[in-house]
Amino acid sequence: MTLKVLSVASEAVPLVKTGGLADVVGALPGALAPNGVELTTLLPGYPAVLAALGKKPKVLHKWESLLGEPARLLAGKLSDHPLLVLDAPGLFARDGGPYGDATGRDWRDNWKRFAAFGRAAADVAGGAVKGLTFDLVHAHDWQAAMTLAYLRFAPTGSTPPSVITIHNMAFQGHYGADVFAGLDLPPHAFAIDGVEYHGGVSFLKAGLAAASRVTTVSPTYAREIREPGFGMGLEGLIRGREADVSGIVNGIDPVVWNPAADPALPATYTIKTLARRAANTLALEAEFGLQAGSGPLFVVISRLTWQKGMDVLLEAADHLVGIGGRLALLGSGDAALESGFHAAAARHPGRIAVRIGYDEALSHRMLGGGDSILVPSRFEPCGLTQLYGLAYGCVPVVSRTGGLADTVIDVNLAARLAGVATGVQFDGVRYNTLADAITRTVGLFGQRETWRGLQRAGMKADFAWECSGQAYADLYARLVEAS
Ligand code: ADP
Ligand code: GLC
């Protein structure tokens, strides 16, 4: 029997992406199909999403007033899998990003945009749209979390079992109590086990409290969020629901991330032809204007934020160059970090080069030509770039947290003797710990056989979706059976 699951999220590759959430939501339907699950994805009707539906998409449903806004439910395809789109022009037909204007400022009505999205998703999941039925609903992050609050407090049909996945605790959707009146929920929903949070309203909290099960994107992060530093105010709720919280590591799409057949690379290669990477390294040096060198070429592909430890990397940049490393960085984010990295590049011409912006193809070339990818995150629910690094023989250097702890094997003595090390890990994101990890990496790079061993072991580590797709399918099946 095929299980029918509605996946509710605000981003999905290839239609709309601000981070790893989009990669995961876009990959899940394909990961679940072989496991007997038909996953239908529901997205907000941002301009780019509507454009992908073509001129005359099929209209499945109309709302005269969805929290006061007219809206329609449209049908489409997400890479061959079923897609539903909430077309509500008053909420989503805007220039800029999914959450804010072109200058990065959040839209003031985000509470209403994503409450309406949740209201519509709850209607769809509960069977209010003729012809659509679902066995389970899976909500991702705060933007989809209100789906579960509406199903719980204001159902318009059935209430299927539910899963909520936390991709990042740092984004919770907190608003003042004044928005409650606009949510169209019964008064008793404004309670400690409902949407209320410290006198205001929290979307993520509402979803976590209402979901049948809570998952996050790595087992280590699932443990970490029980503690204040990582739980970011929701650690009490997570501890209270400990038995219902688990971690399932993200996979990567082996079609998109395959160095043997990557159209973005000057030279493709396999585990057996690693020497061919040298051509990519040369091309990358030329592209970034870096000098050749005997030390490793470090790369960074990241949002430039506090989460990602980019301020600490900036502090360690002089050290990295001082011991013979070079750095190519691609990212965008905090203005102070962007200008800090520009200044570091100006101090070290030919040794540090920076591209501010978002460039998918360049990220592939960096993974195919860089020697080592730096991911010094303060917290990292899963992290995808270290997984790409492993697949591309671009050895990850990571802090020991969240998914980084779960996916990279540190090159300590035991791992080296067993031949299983895949990268370098360090504890605590501070100047000293990161500088020390960089020093270790430069040393390892000088030992050619050891380095090749790290590359090969990483390329063998298979973070394709099979395993995690099965884990989600098992979880769905258990919940549906118990419902
Ligand atoms: P997060 O979602 O927290 O930003 P992840 O590692 O899960 O972190 O996912 C980030 C995704 O965005 C990856 O697919 C990564 O390659 C991509 N990415 C981040 N910054 C850039 C950039 N400047 N250019 C191209 N891709 C980027
Ligand atoms: C979030 C996290 C990242 C994770 C991604 C996809 O953006 O910051 O660690 O890989 O979601 O789950």
Image (cartoon, rainbow, N blue to C red):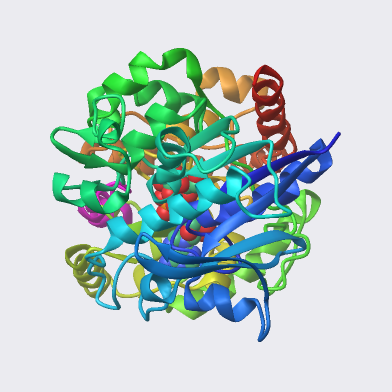
Q: Is residue 204 above or below residue 109?
A: above
Position in image of residue 320 (x %, y %): 32, 53
Q: Residue at x 20, y 51 (%)?
A: 179
Residue 315 forms part of the magenta stretch: yes
Position in image of residue 57 (x %, y %): 67, 77
Looking at the picture, tell me which residue is in the foreground, 418 or 359: 359
Looking at the picture, tell me which residue is in the foreground, 120 or 318: 120
Of all residues, the one furthest to the right in this rendering is 1
Position in image of residue 146 (x %, y %): 40, 44
Residue 147 forms part of the magenta stretch: no
Q: Residue at x 23, y 63 (%)?
A: 334
Residue 277 is at least partly visible in this image: yes
Question: Could you say which quadrant of the image residue 441 lies in?
Answer: top left
Q: Main secondary structure of the magenta part?
A: helix
Q: Is residue 166 above or below residue 318?
A: above
Q: Is residue 85 above or below residue 474?
A: below
Query: Which residue range is magenta in the image?
Result: 306-321
Q: Residue at x 35, y 43 (%)?
A: 377
